[in-house]
Amino acid sequence: MTDDPDGRDEGGRGGDGRDDEVRGARRIPGPRAAADDFDPDRFVPPPKAVPVTQEPDAGQPAPKLPHGVLKALLGAWALTACSAAETEAVEEHLTECAPCADEALRLRDAVGLLHTDRSLDLDPMLRSRVLENCLSRRPAKIPVPEWASPYDAETARLDALLRDIGDSEWHAPVRLKWFEGEHGVNRKTTVAGVIGHLMTVDGLVSTALGLDDPLAESVPDAPRRGSGLPLAPTPRTETYWSAARRPPTRTVREPWRDQSHTLIRTVSFAGRGVSELSVSYGDFALPLQDAMLDRAFECWVHADDIAEAVDYPYEPPSAAHLHRMIDLAARLLPAALAERRRAGLAGPARHLVTAGSPGRSLHLEVEGSGGGNWYIALDSPAALGSPDHTVAQVALDGVEFCQLVAGHVPPVEAAAGQRGDREAIRDVLFAAASLSRL
């Protein structure tokens, strides 16, 4: 064999290429040329395109959907999840199909229950509404007297608050505020301490009704009924707090709750004669009806103090009960003003009149829930307030006025509107704050 000048041997690796056909199976293929893409044997046609359904022209009406499809769309329609065309088709169908229209209304109402933007806290007036509804259908054989209903409602609302708080929150600090002389004062205690204070002062009503005095449980050798224990609210509270061997805990809730229930039952069973009793507060006394209203007022005020300490939402009393609380404070203002005048803390009387006669007056206008108009006699507790003898006017919101009476708002910041005799206005506002106490 001789070598070919081109590097091919005589075996025919060149020439006519027949040997190449024999050996072709063993030949290593070279790189694929671009022209191979057009080789008919290698070409794979692309998949056929799926035709896209064109939207109908805006000017053409949408095709009418069958009843089954429209019924299936009711749920999405109630959730406002349909397209504009589907919504139009469904609503057009609802005008023609009564069963689907009824189903659509039920679904829309059900969707309204799925909203989560509502407060999970119970309405504080829920209990009152339920009781009112129950009593209207089946009146109680022995109903709670109307004058005791504010105390019943406020103790129930406070008990609901106490039921919701945790064990640790009973030790949350609470700052009680009231007014003495010309300045506000305060005292720090706990949630449990506030409930003990309420229970102790409510004991004055218990004593007047011939029931056991709860303060006797804390004072050794003290009589359970009758005299021997302090009558004024402040020394009673101080005695209770100092006699406790350890700081009060949530265990104080049960005796306070039992006592409030006992008071309500007693005045309900006692009949009309019980309203003639009076409750002594040491240096003054109140008729039982006013004393129960006073206890309802203090229960609300201190419940609000507790709610603020534990970050709990709390609403004012109902309008009817709030009006009665404001009325009690307005009736007590002339005597409070006279007491401050005797102590040299108010201006002198200017025009004394005989008892029962109209005299110089201040128009107290209370706005908002529970509001109204009262005329406060300025020169004598025995005089009558009169619109014809008005020398000054003060306007306040109902809750704001109650906060003033509770000693929670400074007198100089209380009135939203003032007109007339400036000295009379100042004296009445400070007299209102002086009604507060521990």
Image (tube, helix red, strand yellow):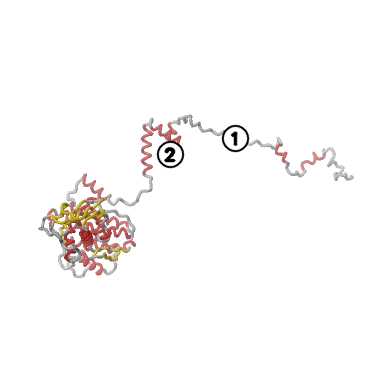
Q: Secondary structure at mark 1?
A: loop
Q: Residue furthest left?
A: 354
Mark 2 burial class by Cα count in 10 Å: few <14, some 14-19, many 20+: some
Disc 2 target residue:
76
Instruction: Return the mark for residue 238.
Output: none
Amino acid of disc 1: Ala
Q: Is residue 266 visible?
A: no
The residue under the point 40% across, 34% down is 91
Residue 366 at x, y = what percent?
A: 23, 53
Residue 362: image x %, image y %?
A: 19, 56
Distance Cα–Cα, label 2 vs label 1:
32 Å
Q: Are marks 2 and 1 in contact (CB under 8 Å)?
A: no
39 or 172, which is in the foreground? 172
Horizontal relation, residue 381 to residue 42: left or right: left
Name the amino acid, label 2: Ala
The picture places residue 387, in percent across and down from the top left corner, at 17, 52
Assess disc 1: are there few (<14), some (14-19) or many (≥20) residues with their C-alpha within 10 Å of its C-alpha: few
Q: Badge 1 is on which residue?
A: 49
Between 386 and 99, the one lying in front of the other is: 386
Secondary structure type for disc 2: helix
User: What residue is at 38 percent from the left and 42 percent from the top?
Assistant: 111
Looking at the figure, which quarter contains the C terminus?
bottom left
Residue occupying the point 36% across, 40% down: 109
For marks 2 and 1 on the same chain, the one whose residue lies earlier in the sequence = 1
